[in-house]
Image (cartoon, rainbow, N blue to C red):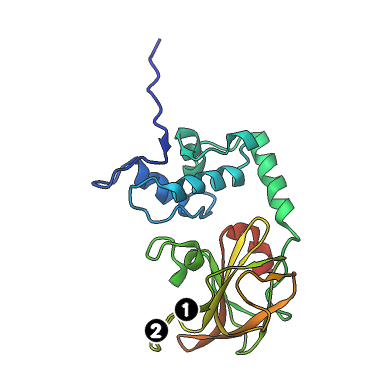
Amino acid sequence: MGVQAEVTVLSVGDREPDGKGPIHGAQWLLAGHNVFKENYDPGTVDGIFGKQTGEACVRAKQALGYPDDAWKTTFGEKLRGFLIGDDPLPEDYAERRQERQQEQTGKFVYPAATKVKLIGFPGGGTHSWTVEPNNWQSDNAWDFAFPFGTALVAVADGVIGDKIGPISTDPNSRFGGLRCYLKTADNEFYYAHLSKFAPETKPGAHVKQGDVIGYSGSASGVNHLHLGCRDWRAFEKTAEA
């Protein structure tokens, strides 16, 4: 009878800064390079299993249908097998995954009254999951080709975050315009390249779904709204309808 090899479980506090090993691999998979094409926002792929990487493991397990009591900040062979496609999701996992996805449907509204062409998508182009800055605000985002000055609304009830105002102080920066965060009950959104805010849009302000929070602007010579979403899969159908 053979002896089963011990399975390595990665957890917060583990490090491998001097070479690419299992932590780099885990972070790479969690950053969108998996069969589900879902970015769970592990932060920088740097071989340091910090708090953000642990939280990404929790988000992955939630998305893949793990039972509630299995949402741990760890990365093991089971999660790896699911993400690389070696192991299919068990039937009960697949059912929970579908149920959780359906719960998200209808939670959000489109960010403006009129739908427009999308000129940027999560994980592609300047939103690449493989190059810097490796954050959800940039990577898990859509670019909506709204005309300059289009009224933008809150996609859900929430609270305006503390980080609000100009994206950059450099007048020549491609990161032009204003930005603000909207924290909802179970997600977070990043509105960027706005030309101005609504008078009520201030740090800590509570907004209702459909409230105008600002007006679209321009960046790199292109009129558009950059809208990032921490859990982007939950907003995908609304953004791309």
> Residue 217: x, y in percent?
56, 86
Q: Is residue 179 left or right of residue 107?
A: left
The front one of 211 and 65 is 211
Q: Is residue 172 visible?
A: yes
- How crowded pointer 2 is (Cα within 10 Å; few <14, some 14-19, many 20+) is rated as few
Relative placement, left or right, of 2 versus 39 is left
* Residue 76 position by quadrant: top left
* Real-space Cα separation, disc 1 to disc 2, in angstroms: 9 Å
Mark 1 or mark 2: name the one nearer the start of the chain.
Answer: 1
> In the rendered view, would you say 143 is above or below 237?
below
- Which residue in the structure is indicated by mark 2? 173
Q: Which residue is mark 1?
A: 167
> Are the two marked residues, 1 and 2, in contact with CB atoms closer than 8 angstroms?
yes
Q: Mark 1: which secondary structure?
A: loop
Q: Is residue 87 left or right of residue 204?
A: left
Residue 195: x, y in percent?
Answer: 57, 87
Position of residue 20 relative to residue 140, above or below, is above
Residue depicted at 59% across the width and 57% down the height: 231
